[in-house]
Amino acid sequence: MVVEILKENGINAETVSCDTDMFKHVDVLLTTRSGKKYIINYLEDIENIQTGMKTPDFASKAYYERRYKKFENSFTTDNKSLKEISFIDQDKLSQIDEKLGYKQCGLYMDDVIEQVKKEFKNFRIIMAENEYLTEEMKQGEKKTKSEIYEKWQNMTDDEILEKKLDWLFNYFNERMDLTGHTDFVMYYSRLLLKQVLTPEEYKNITRYDCFLYNEDIPEQCKILNILDFKNAENKSKIRFCLLEIPDKAYAFSTKPNEYQKLTKEEMEEVKKYAVISKTERPSDLVLKLCDRGNALPLIFHPLGSKILNERADLIDNTLSREAREKELEKLANSIETTDGEITSITIPYPDGEKIYIYIDKNYEFVVQSKKTKDKTIYHYDEETDSFIQEKTKEDDNER
């Protein structure tokens, strides 16, 4: 689609692919009037563009080396020859973005997030100082500075996590004129929460993808204000998200600048008329396998991501960051991902077991033990947005 639009505007463009699976990723190969060629990853960069982030895959050498270098002396998966590819470095791209007005106040969202990350390290002190300054402007009886600082120092870790999320929703929601997948990237992925929260805080957040049917919305709906009825994608099903922490939950949808904070009791009330499904964070292991460019329907399948995340969690958590990264790289390299008639993943485990995952002829997700041949077929139930398990054994002549 992008290629056709560019061609209509007199720009020499064609698609180019580095992946092998049935849903292979496609980039755009631009040729300028001077003959320079650039590879543009619009599909993945669009999420960054929607949130005002840097676009690391836009004609970058790092992206080329990660995905296309293997084709330097041959042809890409869609028979394109890559010769004399040019690149745009970050400084030049920053100048272009400045001229376009893409950067806000001369800053990318990355810069803003980095500043928030630094301030969150001293969150208790900064919030105590802010509250003290607010108290100073009050008329009448005021709290003392020591009382305010003591209050913030005595807050539990769960209370601090709640205060941080309050702050993020109040201030980052102003930029949230977003739809679709980007709300996930912005709020729960590596672009925001994983950056500014501590690893312990991030693990204490559970994300749910949710929906309710129009006809099931009660008159006294707790989350009515956040539901995006204007979104064309919400026809019979109205979709929204929940972020749950130990004592509270945050509900929001693609409706700009709106969120609802819920108590545990209110969340239980919402569960009575909404379908709520826990979703998986994209772990570093999932992201590493994504770059490999095959078996993506399984890697990003909610069950596939869950199994991969659980396997990554078996790596010793007491290792240093560098040692853990090496183990994660080693694990990623040991996982077999294939395409073809059967798209599959084979995951090795420390006890010698290997789990084989594939999509069967009925397009259902299957998990099988290589040792015992026991397998589980997951049947998707659209009404409840969940999977029903069927346990069986493989017949000798099945495959």
Image (cartoon, rainbow, N blue to C red):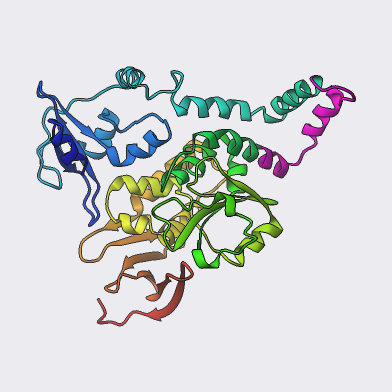
The magenta stretch is 137-163
Residue at (82, 23) in percent of width and height: 138
Residue at (25, 39) in percent of width and height: 67
| Residue 70 seen anywhere in this rendered image of the structure | no
* Residue 158, magenta (yes or no): yes
Residue at (49, 34) in percent of width and height: 175
Which x, y percent locates residue 87? 23, 25
- Between residue 386 and residue 87, name the one nearer to us: 386
Q: Quadrant of the N terminus?
A: top left
Which x, y percent locates residue 242? 56, 53
Determine whether, in the image, residue 177 is placed left or right of residue 261: left
Quarter occupied by residue 103: top left
- Between residue 322 and residue 382, name the one nearer to us: 382
| Residue 362 seen anywhere in this rendered image of the structure | yes
* Total number of numbered discs in the rendering: 0
Determine whether, in the image, residue 254 is placed left or right of residue 67: right
Which x, y percent locates residue 55? 35, 31
* Residue 96, magenta (yes or no): no
In the picture as drawn, the residue positioned furthest to the right comes out as 141
Which x, y percent locates residue 227? 53, 52
In the image, residue 130 sits, relative to residue 284, either above or below, namely above
Determine whether, in the image, residue 84 is placed left or right of residue 178: left
Quarter occupied by residue 172: top right
Residue at (42, 70) in percent of width and height: 382
Q: Quadrant of the C terminus?
A: bottom left
In the image, residue 265 sits, relative to residue 167, either above or below, namely below
Determine whether, in the image, residue 133 is placed left or right of residue 143: left
In the image, residue 22 sits, relative to residue 89, either above or below, namely below
